[in-house]
């Protein structure tokens, strides 16, 4: 009796693929939304981008990696939701049939409690989201990174394999130039192609005379765009309705109403990200 000879390829050990790579394999495009500093509208852009892509019929996931200020559940009016866990992993919370999301905000017992975690614990939570959230097949995963360009956002961003593009959010102040330059370097360091800049809070339209009031000045984003040859995807005015809709958790309805200049201008950001689907993925 002869022993069966095993084919050679079954003997050579294949290196095991990282769990994150395996879990995110069925996602066509992973897009990071980031900003050089906090409070400039990064989460607002990430949430509206995810909702806008979903309203155009794409399958979208939104991952809130902002551990200290997880605002995504509030923006969609989902603060009381808690994710289920089954044999497939952590089930993201659905807002629309084709829009689901995950945030540390869904795991907090009390929304007023601050998260007092050191770096490794924060990284552990994000890593678990990337490894264990059962996103299924998606056209887009929109990732809301922590603000800034320091160690923490860098570590988070480095956990996410093969990002397909970044959207950089800033305000039009001259100092924005400093923060935008940092965001650009950050994206380059990660080898992530920059889709474009978002010039948020670009003036307030006076409700009485209709003329713009340049609250944060002007010119910084244009200069960065020219210096680095990166397009400005949209100029979004200060729009009280945006803040109001976020407080009420009615972002999706706001995008459907399409009533403000902010929302009309925002469409260009959705289109720019949508177009990455047609790009050659070989990098
Ligand atoms: N164009 C705008 N007009 C009016 N309000 C806005 C606009 N953009 C953002 N906001 C409001 O500004 C605040 C900060 O926005 P947001 O939370 O999106 O910023 P952020 O950059 O994600 O902040 P952080 O990452 O530091 O938490 C929110 O209350 C939001 O509703």
Image: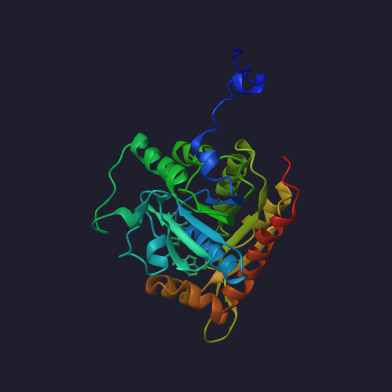
The reply, left or right, for residue 81 in relation to residue 100 is: left
Which x, y percent locates residue 201? 54, 66
Which x, y percent locates residue 188? 64, 39
Q: Nearer the viewer, residue 162 or 167?
A: 162
In the rendered image, is residue 160 in sight? no
In the rendered image, is residue 189 in sight? yes
Q: Nearer the viewer, residue 86 or 32?
A: 86
Quadrant showing the C terminus: top right
Which x, y percent locates residue 98? 53, 66
Number of numbered discs: 0
Q: Is residue 189 above or below residue 201?
A: above
Q: Is residue 20 above or below residue 64?
A: above
Quadrant showing the N terminus: top right
Which x, y percent locates residue 121? 34, 38
Farthest residue toward the bottom?
A: 208
Q: Nearer the viewer, residue 190 or 78?
A: 78
Residue at image point 46% right, 42% down: 131
Display coloring: rainbow
Residue at image point 59% right, 25% down: 14
Q: Quadrant of residue 163?
A: top right
The reply, left or right, for residue 146 in relation to residue 237 is: left
Residue at image point 59% right, 49% down: 26
Q: Quadrant of residue 213?
A: bottom right
């Amino acid at each position: 009796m002869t022993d069966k000879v095993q084919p050679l390829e079954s003997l050579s050990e294949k290196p095991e693929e990282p769990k994150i790579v395996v879990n995110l394999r069925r996602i066509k495009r992973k897009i990071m939304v980031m900003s050089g500093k906090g409070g400039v509208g990064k989460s607002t852009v990430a949430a509206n981008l995810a909702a806008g892509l979903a309203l155009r019929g794409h399958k979208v996931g939104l991952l809130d990696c902002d551990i200290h200020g997880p605002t995504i559940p509030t923006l969609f009016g989902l603060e009381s939701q808690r994710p289920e866990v089954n044999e497939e992993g952590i089930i993201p919370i659905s807002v629309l049939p084709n829009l689901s999301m995950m945030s540390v905000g869904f795991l907090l017992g009390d929304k007023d409690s601050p998260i007092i975690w050191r770096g490794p614990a924060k990284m552990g939570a994000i890593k678990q989201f990337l490894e264990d959230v059962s996103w299924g097949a998606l056209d887009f995963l929109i990732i809301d990174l922590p603000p800034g360009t320091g160690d923490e956002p860098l570590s988070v961003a480095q956990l996410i394999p093969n990002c397909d593009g970044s959207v950089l959010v800033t305000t039009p102040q001259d100092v924005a130039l400093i923060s935008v330059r940092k965001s650009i370097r950050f994206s380059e360091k990660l080898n992530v192609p920059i889709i474009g800049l978002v010039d948020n809070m670009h003036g307030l339209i006076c409700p009485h005379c209709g003329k713009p009031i340049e609250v944060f000045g002007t010119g910084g984003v244009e200069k960065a765009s020219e210096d680095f040859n990166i397009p400005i995807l949209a100029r979004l005015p200060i729009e009280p309705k945006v803040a109001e809709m976020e407080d009420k958790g009615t972002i999706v309805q706001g995008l459907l109403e399409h009533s403000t200049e902010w929302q009309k201008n925002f469409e260009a950001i959705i289109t720019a990200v949508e177009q990455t689907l047609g790009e050659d993925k070989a990098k």
